[in-house]
Image (cartoon, grey):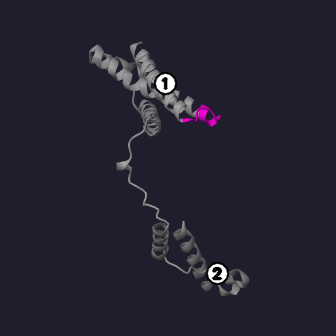
Amino acid sequence: MALLGRSLSRSHQLWAIAHPSLGSCASSRVMMATSAQEEQQRYLEKNSSLNRPLSPHLTIYKPQLTSMLSITHRGTGIALTGMLYTFGLTMSVLPGDYATYLAMVQSWSMGPSLISLSKLAIAWPVSFHVLNGMRHLFWDMGYGFDIKKLYTSGWTVLALSLISGIAIAAI
């Protein structure tokens, strides 16, 4: 942020030098006393004097249920969006209609286990994303923020999404 402010003030200074006839508008310059490296060094020295450690890298954190569910929620949202757009755009540019391509897939004679796994690969992300989205809506209303409720709702979302995903894939 400091770099953005510094670059904006420097471009303002160059503009003011190039247009001296604008008077008071050109005289309101902001001079920066320190460079980015000096500010960073000052920040590190301040944290060192206050005995603050550097932020640890993600590799030393133990994965928690809440963080893994959050990452999975974002991943399923991105994947579902990508699949929806890909399917929609593909069907809009290919010749023929949906029934033609459904008949083509049926002619491949895939075994029932592969078909069930394919259906589960579509059904589980949808059910997980919907159920975890409902969990987030409860959070938006201010419910379920203590640690026990967070973990209970997380495990509930995982169990219900697996059960509903399997149920949908079995149809």
Q: Quadrant of the N terminus?
A: bottom right
Residue with the mark numbered 1 = 156
Residue sitting at x 56%, y 78%: 10
Q: Quadrant of the C terminus?
A: top left
Disc 1 marks which amino acid? Thr
Give residue 86's position: percent from left, percent from top: 42, 35
* First of labels 2, 1 by sequence position: 2
Number of the front mark, 2 or 1: 1
On screen, residue 94 above or below 30: above
Q: Is the magenta stretch mostly helix, strand or loop?
A: loop
- Verify whether residue 139 appears in magenta: yes
Q: What stretch is highlighted in magenta?
A: 137-146
Q: Which mark is residue 29?
A: 2
- Count residues near mark 2 (Cα–Cα under 10 Å), then give few for <14, some for 14-19, many for 20+: some
User: In this rendering, does residue 97 appear at all?
Assistant: no
Residue sitting at x 47%, y 21%: 160
